[in-house]
Amino acid sequence: MCRMIAFSGRCLQCAESFTWDDLSQRLSCLEAKNAGVFGMCRRGVQIEQHAFDQECDRCTAENGVDEGYGDGHKQKRQRTS
Ligand SMILES: [Zn+2]
Ligand SMILES: [Zn+2]
């Protein structure tokens, strides 16, 4: 059976809750590997949910902006407030 490991938690800065898609992992079992598709097996996918708190991308970007990352990639400035 395949396993998907998902992480979700709260941002340490803005306290919003997030699912950390970048951290999630998909582990295919042998059967799914042979089929070439994640989850393509008799027993399906088991999802493991883990709690994980970290700064969200937005807060990380905002904190990083003034530290000399001036060349424009990885700058996301989106504020809802
Ligand atoms: Zn599987
Ligand atoms: Zn945040």
Image (cartoon, grey):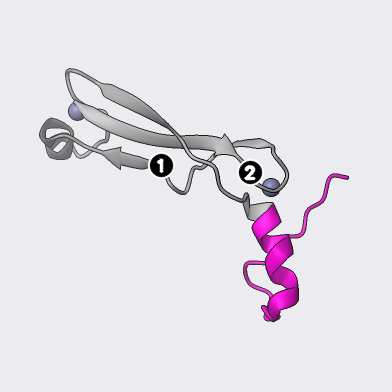
Ligand 2 within 8 Å of the CB at mark 2: yes
Image spot of residue 31 (x, y percent): 12, 31
Seen as rendered, the residue at the extreme front is 12
Is residue 79 rendered to the left or right of residue 28?
right
Image spot of residue 36 (x, y percent): 20, 40
- The image shows residue 42, relative to residue 60, as above or below, that is above
Is residue 17 rendered to the left or right of residue 41?
right
Depth check, mark 2 against mark 1: the one in front is 2
Residue 59 is tagged as none
Q: Main secondary structure of the magenta part?
A: loop
For label 2, the residue is 11
- The image shows residue 63, relative to residue 78, as above or below, that is below
Q: Residue at x 62, y 49 (%)?
A: 56
Q: Residue at x 67, y 81 (%)?
A: 71
* Separation of residues labelled 2 and 1 (CA atoms): 16 Å
Disc 2 or 1, which lies upstream in sequence?
2
Residue 70 within the magenta-colored segment of the rendering? yes
Q: Residue at x 63, y 43 (%)?
A: 11
Report which quarter residue 41 is drawn in. top left
Over which residues does the magenta segment extend?
A: 59-81
For label 1, the residue is 24
Residue 65 within the magenta-colored segment of the rendering? yes
Seen as rendered, the residue at the extreme right is 81
Image spot of residue 72 (x, y percent): 69, 75
